[in-house]
Image (spheres, rainbow, N blue to C red):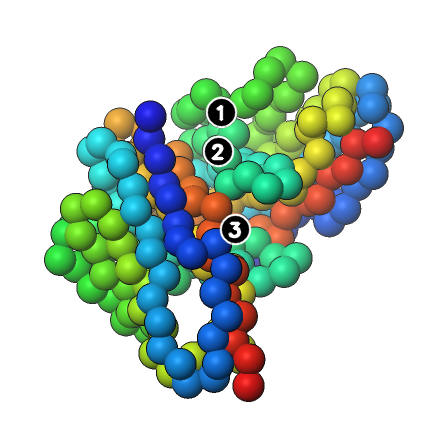
Amino acid sequence: EAGVTQFPSHSVIEKGQTVTLRCDPISGHDNLYWYRRVMGKEIKFLLHFVKESKQDESGMPNNRFLAERTGGTYSTLKVQPAELEDSGVYFCASSHEVAAYGYTFGSGTRLTVV
Amino acid sequence: EDQVTQSPEALRLQEGESSSLNCSYTVSGLRGLFWYRQDPGKGPEFLFTLYSAGEEKEKERLKATLTKKESFLHITAPKPEDSATYLCAVLRGSTLGRLYFGRGTQLTVWP
């Protein structure tokens, strides 16, 4: 089966600009997650979708971040306006069931805000 | 505050030299503990899930164990291709779906 696909793989934007990251989960996976790793820190949870609904968005840093999941398929994560501290690697993961066999992660999008 | 701490931060082993990585956690209501492997430029790759103290899982040269406070990832006779960052993550019952990660152990196996 195809894995979790994320694009772009890299993005360099200026402070104040907008960036949209996209994630295509494994087909049939109802659960979709966004995580982020900033330099020197651990991977941290951002939010969890079940189908098209936000199950848990408690990890979203602030209202500059907006996540959507259209029709329960792919998801986008928009950062507007971007700040320097938003730089990091953004991972998407999906799973059929929560806590069943682990989550399948994408390769991530490396975001650099300059 | 929930915490997941991995040690050591980095580990260099000679090929064939067995060792263990540690993941200690202070999480209430543990639902599961996950081990992942991450290669440079890639996302975490699932290795094991452990659900209760005393449980063990094995895969090739890797063996994961779980107690009430920590988990160990034992690597037996490692090979250079085992070089990667190994991540531990826990799942709490009260925040189902949300993984809490440690910072990882960067393992280098030299021939």
| Crowding at mark 1 (Cα within 10 Å: few <14, some 14-19, many 20+) | some
Cβ atoms under marks 2 and 1 closer than 8 Å: yes
Circle nearer the N terminus (2, 3):
2
Q: Which mark is residue A105?
A: 3
Report the amino acid beneath label 1: Gly
User: Which residue is at a point 68% across and 44% down the rendered structure image?
Assistant: A109
**SS assignment at label 2:** strand
Q: CA distance from mark 2 to mark 1?
A: 6 Å
User: Which residue is at a point 59% across and 42% down the rendered structure image?
Assistant: A40
The residue at which mark 1 appears reads as A59
- Percent position (x, y) of residue A89? 65, 42
| Crowding at mark 2 (Cα within 10 Å: few <14, some 14-19, many 20+) | many
Q: Nearer the viewer, residue B17 or B41?
A: B17
The residue at which mark 2 appears reads as A45
Quarter occupied by the C terminus of chain A: top right
Chain ID at mark 1: A
Which image quarter: residue B95?
A: top left
Which image quarter: residue A8?
A: top right
Left/right of residue A18 with respect to residue B89 in the rendered view: right
Which image quarter: residue A101?
A: bottom left
